[in-house]
Every structure is written in structure tokens, then in C-alpha cells.
Image: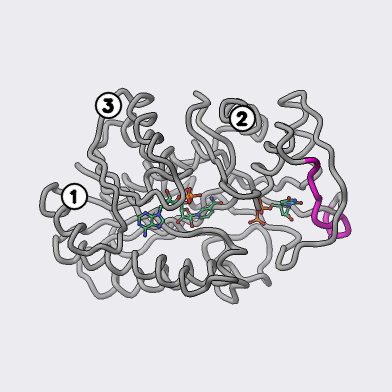
Amino acid sequence: MTIFVTGGAGYIGSHVVIELLEQGHNVVVADNFSNSKRGVIERICRLAGREFPFYEMDIRDADGLGRIFSEYRIDSIIHLAGLKAVGESVSKPLEYYANNLESTMVLIDAMKTHNVKKFIFSSSATVYSADNEMPLTEESRTGGCTNPYGWTKFMCEQILCDYANAANGCAVVLLRYFNPIGAHPSGLIGEDPQDIPNNLMPYIAQTAAGRLPFLSVFGDDYDTPDGTCVRDYIHVSDLAAGHVAAIKHLDSNSGVSVFNLGTGKGVSVLEFVAAFEEATGVSIPKKTAGRRSGDLPLQCASTEKAKRELGWEAKRTLYDACVDTWRWQKGID
Ligand code: NAD
Ligand code: UDP
């Protein structure tokens, strides 16, 4: 069985590829390195102890995809490639719609032409509406996204649902990631934002490394236990294992299945900082700043469906994620 992984050089994709190789799957990987580095591929091979076919290409290149699908017997697709910066999507909406929607449609077209039946899509908790009760279940309302990035995920989900309804015997899994953090325990693979990070973990890690002077805590007057926002942070290696569980699920299910990939535990910004300090022994200078526009006070996953139907749950702790991130961060500084 061969799995075609798009975006396999990226932060999450690199961990997914390692996990698939370690579980004995064959992979073919494609990435255009628009937000990743070539060296990652060699490091994945080293960690997994195996080589695999890699293509440097834009997934929107239909001819290129056609050649790959003709050469290998692709059984399923894991589609991680995409642009993902929320703020950038507000200033460059067309780039986001063009990249994220077109790549998904060109892939579906290749899937149809080459009779591939199984597709896993990297979606996000951002597709959920702001007015839901917590924790979010897969049945919670979606839509009302607050930025173009979120809308691209919402629209890709819709396109995949419509395709699965029309195509006989097709199986689609939509994985809604909560907040991925952490790095591979080897310290060789992790997240390395090129600009000043937007997300909490890389911001804290770069502050700990002395690259940034202090962390701005965006709002301490929310209606949460300590006034700071609460999120569901999941170790990227657990997230990767969720994809292997989803591959198994595709073997015996058709139609569309949706799963949250989170831990089910909410952690506030202040609790997060305290955990990082405890895990690393490095203190993080911080200042309270105003609320960041668009932030919800609380977002947390219900993980019951993934446990029940995928037999998967997150195993690693926030402490593990902080230790692993710090090992990775020290290696790249
Ligand atoms: P990433 O930027 O590290 O990885 C994405 C990879 O896709 C990069 O290596 C990039 O070079 C590649 N890519 C982008 N457009 C491409 C194209 N047209 N053709 C070929 N390659 C292309 O991001 P990530 O954090 O690993 O995210 C992976 C997926 O998970 C994305 O779809 C993202 O939207 C989704 N997701 C991420 C998060 C998160 O917090 N990181 C949360 C929810 C969902
Ligand atoms: N956050 C913060 N300072 C930062 C970055 C993030 O206080 O420099 C907060 C942010 O307001 C949110 C939480 O940390 O409440 C997680 O933010 P992130 O951007 O990582 O994830 P998302 O907002 O997408 O859930």
C-alpha cells in the first residue's frame, strides 16, 4: 500500500511521514518547499531508517501529479500541503484561496482519473463557529470563519464532502487539528517559523532562546479561570499517530468521516508558560498586552469519537511537548 503525502516536508507532514514509515507504510511525498527546507527530507530518512520517493513540485501541477499517479499504485492520499498563516491570509486572501482550494481540487481530479478511493484532509478547529458550547464535538456548528485561511479549510471540507457523495465507494476523512505543538524527540525535526512566530509555542521557545525579548500575553481579562485564553494543545507526534489510525479507518469505511484530533484538555496561556518553565528550567519574561483580535476565550476538543472509532488518543503531555520543543529549538539556534 502506497500513500501519497502532500506537504510532507512541513512541520506536521514531516512527523506524519516518519510515523507512516515506522508503521511499515510506503510513501511518496511531494512539497514545493514554500514553507519548509530541503534538509528535512534527508533527516526523515535518517530517523526512519528508510528512503522514499520525494518530488519537489507544486501540487497544483496537474501533469506532474498525473505522472506520479501513473508511476506508483497510490492507494490513499494525505493532503497536508497548504498555506496556514491566519494573519497573512487576511492580507493575501487570493493567494490562500488559490493555493488551498486549487491544490485540493487538482488532487481530487488526479484521484478520480487514477481511481484512488481514499483521502485524508488536514482540516482545523478553526472551521467551528464561535458560538458553540465546549467541548467541540464533530457535530458542533461550522462556518462563520473569521479569516480567509479558515474559510479555505471550510470550503475544502465542503468540496470533499460533495465529491465523496458523488463518487461511488470513495472514503474521505476530515481531521480537525486543535493546536499542534512539540517536536520529534530526536530534536532533528520541528517547527521553525521564518518570521516572528504568531503561535504561542514557537514564540515562547524563541523567547527562551533569547531571540525575542518577552512574550506578550494577549489578554488577561477573559472569562476563564486565570483570565487568559484556553486552548487544546496536542503533541505533533500524537497528531501524526492520528493519521495512521485514520488510514486504518479508511480500509473499512466509505463516505465522509470527521474527527477532532486534540487532547480534550484545556490549558491557559499562563499555565502553558508555567509548564514550559518547569520543563526547561528557563524563565520566560512576559508582559500582559491587549486582546488579539479574533481570539476566542476557550477552545477545546471532545475526543470521544476519535477514541471510539479510530482507537486513537493523545498520549504525550504538555510537559513532553515543552521538553521536545526546547531540545529542537536549542539545536537550531
Ligand atoms: P507547514 O507550512 O509547515 O507545512 C505545509 C507544507 O506544504 C510546507 O512544507 C509547504 O512548503 C507545503 N506547500 C504549501 N503549498 C504547497 C503547494 N501548493 N504545493 C506543494 N507544497 C506546498 O504547515 P503545517 O503546520 O505542517 O500544516 C500542515 C497542514 O495542517 C496545513 O494544511 C495546515 O493548514 C493544517 N493545520 C495546521 C495547524 C497548525 O497549527 N500547524 C492547525 C490546523 C491545521
Ligand atoms: N498567544 C499569546 N501570545 C502570543 C501568541 C499567542 O498570548 O505571542 C495566545 C493567543 O492569544 C491564544 C493562545 O496563545 O489565546 C494560542 O495562540 P496560537 O496562535 O498558538 O493558537 P490559536 O490562536 O490559533 O488557537
Is 221 covered by the magenta stretch? yes
Q: What count of labels does the image hold?
A: 3
Q: CA distance from mark 1 to mark 3?
A: 19 Å
Q: Is residue 11 left or right of residue 203?
A: left
Residue 287 pos. (x, y %): 87, 47
Is 168 covered by the magenta stretch? no
Q: Which residues are magenta?
A: 213-224
Q: CA distance from mark 3 to mark 2?
A: 28 Å
Lower sequence index among marks 3 and 2: 3
Residue 233 numbered mark, or none: none
| Label 2 residue SS | loop
Residue 185 pos. (x, y %): 52, 26
Q: Is residue 282 left or right of residue 41?
A: right
Name the kind of residue labelled 2 in the image. Asp
Q: Residue at x 34, y 49 (%)?
A: 31
Residue toward you, 239 or 302 = 239
Image height check: is 96 above or below 263? below
The quarter of the rendered structure image containing the C terminus is top right
Q: Is mark 3 within 8 Å of ligand 1?
A: no
Residue toward you, 240 or 283 = 283
- Which residue matches tag 1? 74
Name the kind of residue labelled 1 in the image. Ile
Name the kind of residue labelled 3 in the image. Arg
- Which residue matches tag 2? 333
Residue 50 numbered mark, or none: 3
